[in-house]
Amino acid sequence: MADHMAAGAYHQLLRAATTPLALQLLLLLAIPLLFLHFVSQRHRHGSSKPQPKKRVLPPSPPALPIIGHLHLVGDRPHISLRTLAAKHGSGGGGLMLLRLGAVPNLVVSSPRAAQLVMRTHDHAFASRPASKVSDALLYGSSDIGFSPYGEHWRQLRRLVTTHLFTVKKVNSYRLARQEEVRLVMDKIREAVAGSKTVDISETMNTYANDMVCRAVSGKFFRAEGRNKLFRELIEVNTRLITGFNLEEYYPGLANALSSLMASWFASNEVAKAHKRWDELLETIIKDHEGRRSRSDVGDVGDDAGQEESDFIDVLLSVHKEYGITRDHIKAILMDMFGAGTDTSSLVLELAMAELMRNPELMTKLQAEVRENTPRGQEMVTQDDIANMPYLRPVVKETLRLHPPAPLLLPHLSMVDCEVDGYTIPSGTRVIINEWAISRDPDSWEKAEEFMPERFMDGGSAAAVDFRGNDFQFVPFGAGRRICPGLNFGMATVEIMLANLVYCFDWELPAGMAKEEIDMTEVFGLTVHPKEKLILVPKPRGAVAHACRMSDSF
């Protein structure tokens, strides 16, 4: 989850850097930068030292002085990068080198190239680029998503994979998921009674946020409106992280102005946001410490009956073992709150949009869910999902066509590395275009069509999964930096989608045809539809009573 938050941030940063205003600001830097470039070139060519053997770099389109290839990126980077790679990249577009400002970026656009970067040479590309904004917000980038590769990151990774996101731990939240789903079903039932529409976009965002808040901080997260405060602070982080940042494109100039920038960061909105986060997280941690002290809780076991042993309880129990400080705990929590909301809510929204655009697929999924849920049962449970083989292919196909973070969080080369015959210099950023990879016509039959059947037994992609071993499908990344929260995210999505199609039939607003569902993308922290998905819920005839949520859950 953390990686998806940061990936979306970098995606939006590219967009911010290519707006007319940003390009005008960059052009203002042209004269001093051209002068520095001229001086450095004279110094280099005037040197009597022998020049090293010329390295073979990946192919690249023609660049402009100062801004490099920034003008080619456009406001939909994943699409423009695929087009550029097809024209200028190596081996059908697999590898392409772009200079964004003064920073070299290796663009990866094919499954084969992705495997070379995230498996064959995984260790060389396992780090992350530095960011003064993430340093200021996330306690020196001591979280999981932005932390550079090293011992601290390895300890964090071991902690979350061992204690927070195991299959057993994710399953321990099954009752919490059912309760959160029940609350959503209750609200939709109220809409049915009032003959009202439902804003699927907003409803799914609220559900995903509430589920993450509950898992991270326990069932008391709604106290004093904390869930709403979390959403507000997440939006602030999004705006700050995705804004134009000089060091992302001209690190040398940013370093030269480091004292000025440090003063600015200390007094601007970044510092204010960090202070608000710190105060909120400190309050929540102290609440947990007080409850633990009163109940003398020492064990944070993973049994289903202990689902309210939340992430904070776990972190407080094991932080000394892993050398994790209080500030490190806060940085991890900020990752969890921010990363778990958009990804899950977008997959749910886009899955419903695709099902409404393909009513025969909606009918097929509803039939499966309703046939495999015991008659008269009020909700689909986690146990029922095991008997629904079409449900996961629908989710996987949504992730394939609409990855929430089309450009994965950039990797950073820590050493010079040879990839497919090309030298990738140390310090090169690596952009993995998952959107292009998951629509690669050489890997996917009818790559632009929504076809969940491809993932069913006997389908062309039946054996393809999202866990980092199949490089034509890496929505969660792969290798050392694969998203550790993928099991949690999938569980959050599947239980909600199953209940949406189990309890209700769905219609478009009066006068709207399925062809009018707008799938145009808008870029923010993640990629989301331009228009909200508004649907009309109807109780399904024979089991309308099954939508009445009782206190039995």
Image (cartoon, helix red, strand yellow):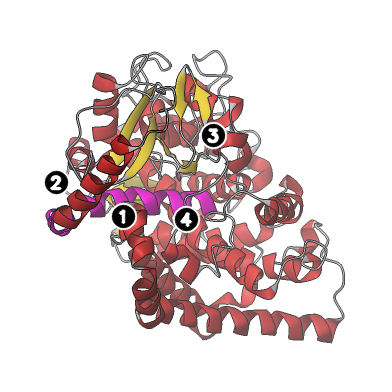
The CA span between labels 1 and 4 is 21 Å
Which residues make up the magenta segment?
Answer: 1-29
Can you tell which of label 3 and label 4 is closer to the viewer? 4
Q: SS at mark 4?
A: loop
The CA span between labels 2 and 3 is 32 Å
Q: SS at mark 1?
A: loop
Can you tell which of label 1 and label 4 is closer to the viewer? 4
Name the residue located 87 percent from the left edge and 72 percent from the top edge.
298
Mark closer to the chain start, 2 or 4? 4
Q: SS at mark 3?
A: helix
| Along the viewing direction, whichever of 213 and 384 lies nearer the viewer | 213
Can you tell which of label 2 and label 3 is closer to the viewer? 3
Q: Are discs 2 and 3 less than 8 Å apart at CB? A: no
The CA span between labels 1 and 3 is 27 Å
Name the residue located 44 percent from the left edge and 27 percent from the top edge.
52
Mark closer to the chain start, 2 or 3? 3
> Which label belongs to residue 392?
3
Can you tell which of label 2 and label 4 is closer to the viewer? 4
Residue 116 lies, with reference to residue 128, above or below; the image says: above
| Along the viewing direction, whichever of 147 and 297 lies nearer the viewer | 147
Residue 301 lies, with reference to residue 38, above or below; the image says: below
Residue 141 horizontal/vertical position (percent): 54, 62
Q: Which residue is mark 2?
A: 511
Residue 260 horizontal/vertical position (percent): 34, 75
The CA span between labels 3 and 4 is 36 Å
Magenta run includes residue 180: no
Quarter holding the C terminus is bottom right
Q: Which residue is mark 1?
A: 524
Can you tell which of label 2 and label 1 is closer to the viewer? 1
| Along the viewing direction, whichever of 57 and 326 lies nearer the viewer | 57
